[in-house]
Image (cartoon, helix red, strand yellow):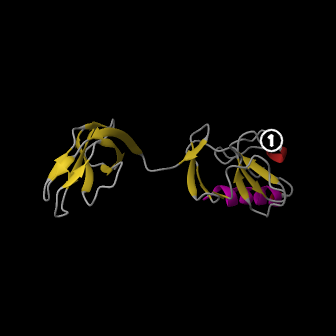
Amino acid sequence: MTTTPNLVMSYIASSQAQKEITHNDALNDLDFLVQPSVIDHTLATPPGSPSQGDAYIVAASPTGAWSGAAGSIAAYYSGWKLKAPEAGWTCWARNDSRLLYYTGSAWGLLATPHLDATATFNPGAISTGAGVTSSGITVTGAAFGDFAIASAPYDLQGVDATAYVSASNTVKIRANNLTGGTVTLSSGSWRVRVIKA
C-alpha cells in the first residue's frame, strides 16, 4: 500500500475492501498532526491510562510501545500511533507552554532570534541632565533596525539605560540621568541583547 509523501498516510487502494479503516486511520493522523499540541515532550515511557487523542513528543531512550521512536510524535487512538517528524515541523508543548520545532534531528525551543554579549562599562559620576555612552560592544550579526536592550549588574538609582545598534556588529549603551541630582555608577559587566528585526 502506498502512502502520502509528508504525513505518511495510507492511500485507499483501488477496489480495496473496508476502505473506512484506511480513511479513519488517515483522519486520526490529521487529528494529531495538523496544528499539533502535545501534553508533554519529556516522557520516554508511555503513560498508563491515556485518553483518546492524547499526544506526546517521545523523549530520548524510549521504552514500551514507544521503543525506538525517540523524537516522534506519539498519539493514542485505541493504541499508540507514532509519526517521525520532518524538519520544520512545529508543535505546542502544554507541559511547559512552549512552541517547539524539529531541526531534522531534534526538537528545539522556537524563540525569537537574539544575540547576546557582555562588556565592562564604567559610567562613573553622571550629573543631572547628562548622559554617558559606552564604547562599542561587538555583537556579531547586529544590524541597523534590530532591537537592542541593556541590563546593568546593579541598581541604576533612577538612571535610564538604553542600548542601540551604532554600526554593523556593534552596540552601544547610553546611560541618561534625569533624577535631579548627580548619580555615580561603578564599573561592572553589563549585558546587551539584540533581537533580530
Q: Nearer the viewer, residue 1 or 91?
A: 91
The residue lying at 77 percent from left, 51 percent from top is: 81
Q: Nearer the viewer, residue 84 or 24?
A: 84
Q: Nearer the viewer, residue 104 or 106?
A: 106
Q: Position of residue 163 (x, y in %)?
A: 27, 49
Q: Position of residue 145 (x, y in %)?
A: 27, 49
Given the image, on which type of amino acid does mark 1 rest?
Ser
What SS does tag 1 mark?
Answer: loop
Please give the residue where the numbered disc 1 appears in the rendered image: 67
For the question of whether residue 14 can be seen, the reply is no
Taking 157 as reference, is 28 left or right?
right
Marks counted in the figure total 1
The quarter of the picture where the N terminus appears is top right
The residue lying at 79 percent from left, 48 percent from top is: 45
Q: Position of residue 61 (x, y in %)?
A: 75, 39
Q: Which residues are magenta?
A: 20-35
For the question of whether residue 8 can be seen, the reply is yes
Q: Position of residue 60 (x, y in %)?
A: 71, 40
> Quick check: is 124 in the magenta stretch?
no
Q: Would you identify the image quadrant in which residue 170 lies?
A: top left
The image shows residue 3, relative to residue 26, as above or below, that is: above
